[in-house]
Image (spheres, rainbow, N blue to C red):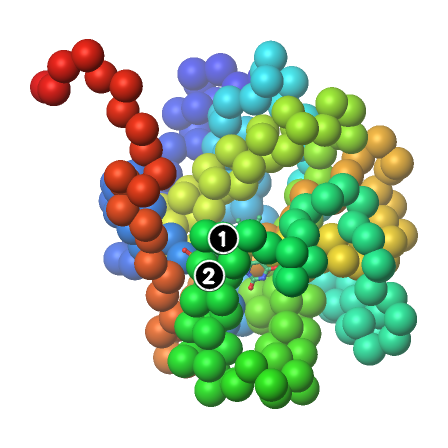
Amino acid sequence: MNDTTTTTKLAAPAAPANGAATVVEALLTRRSVRAFLPTPVPRAEVERLLALASRSASNSNSQPWHVHVLTGEPKLRLTEALWQALDGEGRVAETEYPFQPPPEEWEEPFRSRRQTFGEGLYRDTLGIEAHDAEGRLAHHRRNYDFFGAPVGLVLTVSRSPLAGALIDAGLFLQALMLLARQAGLDTCPQASFIDFYPVLRQHLKIPDDQIIVCGLALGHADPDHRLSRHRTAREPVDTFTTFHSGETV
Ligand SMILES: Cc1cc2nc3c(=O)[nH]c(=O)nc-3n(C[C@H](O)[C@H](O)[C@H](O)COP(=O)(O)O)c2cc1C
């Protein structure tokens, strides 16, 4: 367990030039990066980020998360296995838990937002049209080498109780992504891994009582790659908030 002494040890070193200095800056500069430089991230730095992320809240402090950290050869071997599965018949028909509906079953307003996102990424950023299945697959494939990031993480949680554990995992993931920004690093959360959960289970020896939440690419963004120009918008507060106030302050 972390006490205040270890917490002091985990304090961020002086923020690097491209690192966020405040939580607001970390939130505003975090984005899903899909092109990384090969520059390695030291293991001690990954451990520091994970220790800090574990300060996240969880239901009854159950801390149901488990993280697999892949670098070097093990990461390459996993990518090879996933590409083989992608090129063959390895994609599962159904994920282990219902992560999202099939594309045709998405309802509004999420359907339109998903479409806007897809057009922004594929057409506007990569120049790949909707009908270009091959082009889209070529980009999708890069998910499985963590978009060239030197560190690939796979986050799992205890299967029981699942719903609460998934919320806890989300908090852990967000903390990790913001902490990475403070350290001058970037990330991309990747649910695409769950389409190949049997491959991950086998390679990472994930026990049956754990469920795979997602992957996370971690490293230094490649600022010159065209994918680094991709940005996403957000809806205004009044579209997702209901104030039940007695008076206006
Ligand atoms: C749970 C989760 C799973 C995601 N899975 C993928 C993925 O498999 N591949 C990918 O390129 N982006 C993935 N993303 C990134 C989202 O597309 C991205 O967060 C969203 O479009 C908003 O953009 P931003 O992160 O740049 O702000 C995922 C994000 C979340 C939170």
Please indicate, yes or no, whether residue 118 appears anywhere in the rendered image.
yes
Horizontal side of 183 relative to 42 (left or right) equals left
Residue 224: quarter of image:
bottom left
* Amino acid identity at mark 1: Glu
What count of labels does the image hold? 2
* Amino acid identity at mark 2: Ser
Horizontal side of 169 relative to 200 (left or right) equals left
Q: Position of residue 239 (x, y in %)?
A: 31, 42
Q: Residue at x 45, y 59 (%)?
A: 113
Question: Residue 108's mark?
Answer: 1
Look at the image and tell me in which quarter the N terminus lies: top right
Please indicate, yes or no, whether residue 186 appears anywhere in the rendered image.
no
* Disc 1 secondary structure class: loop
To which residue does mark 2 refer?
A: 112
Q: Residue at x 67, y 79 (%)?
A: 137
Mark 2–mark 1 Cα distance, whole angstroms, equals: 6 Å
Horizontal side of 156 relative to 11 (left or right) equals right
Q: Residue at x 67, y 86 (%)?
A: 134
Q: Residues within 10 Å of mark 1 (few under 14, many from 20)?
A: few
Question: Residue 235's mark?
Answer: none
Q: Are marks 2 and 1 in contact (CB under 8 Å)?
A: yes
* Disc 2 secondary structure class: helix
Q: Residues within 10 Å of mark 2 (few under 14, many from 20)?
A: few
Q: Position of residue 33 (x, y in %)?
A: 46, 64
| Mark 2 sits near ligand 1, with its Cβ under 8 Å away | no
Q: Give whichever of 125, 94 is nearer the camera.
A: 94
Horizontal side of 195 relative to 52 (left or right) equals right
Classify 70 as above or below 159: below
Q: Residue at x 60, y 85 (%)?
A: 131
Residue 29: quarter of image:
bottom left
Look at the image and tell me in which quarter the C terminus lies: top left
| Mark 1 sits near ligand 1, with its Cβ under 8 Å away | no
